Amino acid sequence: MEKKTLISILTWNDHDETIACLRSLGNNLPPGSRVLVIDNGSDVPFDPLDMSGAMEFEHVRLDENRGFAGGQNVGIQYAINHDFDYVWLLNNDCIVPPGVLDKLIGEIESDSQIGAVSPIIVHDHLNGTIQFQGAWNNWESIETDFPKTRDEAVYAQESRPREIWLYGTALLLRIEAVNGVGLLDERYFAYAEDTEFGTRLSRKGWISRVCFDATVIHNTNQGWLTHKPYYHYLIARNRYIFFMENTPKEFRKGLARRLIARMIRVAAELNAFGNKASAHAALQGLMDAMRKKYGGYVVDKRFAFINQLLLWHPYFLATIIEEGITGALKAIGRRGGKL
């Protein structure tokens, strides 16, 4: 029986990239595929006529920006309601070479325990260098670990199959798995919702895999220090939420203090680089996480003075939070009076 796959593409104020993505899909999609473009409350609505005659697709416009999680949940729910077997969450800033979706479907159908599959994702502007080829949570260091080489990525996938999670950039999901674990967590709005979803899949017994024979090109060109404030706000807030809610018991000692200290140090790096707006956004994200404020980024000027205090001597403050006053003094001694 022919498998049905929905390609769900979210667009928000960058419709030229959406059109380029659609054109790359062209007529290279396997039988049983359908494309859904979701306009996530753009200031200027996406006009389907811009693609008139180029390819067929469905179009939905949302009244407001619901973030990646909320917007793509519309696509996932559409796939569930219309009895699709798979849904491919595809960033609108991706270019898809021919045959990619066929390979992803082949990978997910190779094992009934596979709930999610991603291609290798490469940067479009760095000579095709790899952006993503799998990841897993390092609970001890409260970090995400990424393989540095293809061999390491393959080994990680084979040696820790139920720990791997995948970026949402070009993520093929089995609808049966989604029905078992639920939709994306909309509290995250954007960023880290894929980490949480992949972790949820693993804990429910599903496997996430990278298809090393398939590659998607991702149009992203910013280093983390130059990212805009909304990015650092969401990363800081969602990182705190994710690790506080998901870290296993054996790694939870001092968890909140370690996360707070880590984010103060990140804000200090941003501030030293000259990206002061992002430093303040990251600190607001941390505080919003602790007071359980979700959704998108809205500058809260009430935090401006507090942020200035936190950035006065951030490394000393972070060490006090993480290790206590005695630990901070010992650290100063070990480092010759510097932190």
Image (tube, grey):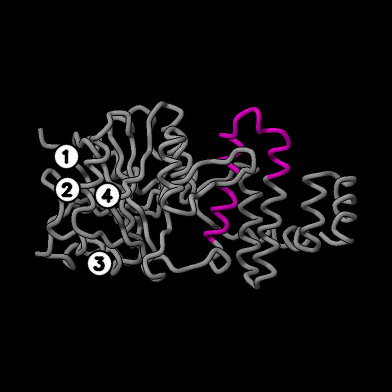
Q: Amino acid at mark 4?
A: Ser
CB-based contact (under 8 Å), mark 2 and mark 3: no
Q: Where is residue 134 shown, x and y percent of the image? A: 43, 47
Which segment did they paint magenta? Answer: 230-258
* Residue at the disc numbered 4: 8
Q: Is residue 86 above or below residue 205?
A: below
* Residue at the disc numbered 2: 34
Task: Tell me which numbered mark, 2 or 3, is placed earlier along the sequence.
Answer: 3
Q: Amino acid at mark 2?
A: Arg
Find the residue positioned furthest to the bottom: 274
Gap in angstroms between the C-alphas marked 2 and 3: 17 Å
Gap in angstroms between the C-alphas marked 4 and 1: 13 Å
Residue at image point 42% right, 54% down: 132
* Residue at the disc numbered 1: 4
CB-based contact (under 8 Å), mark 1 and mark 2: yes
Magenta span: predominant SS is helix
Task: Tell me which numbered mark, 2 or 4, is placed earlier along the sequence.
Answer: 4
Mark 3 is surrounded, within 10 Å at the Cα level, by few (under 14), some (14 to 19) or many (20 or more) other residues, namely some
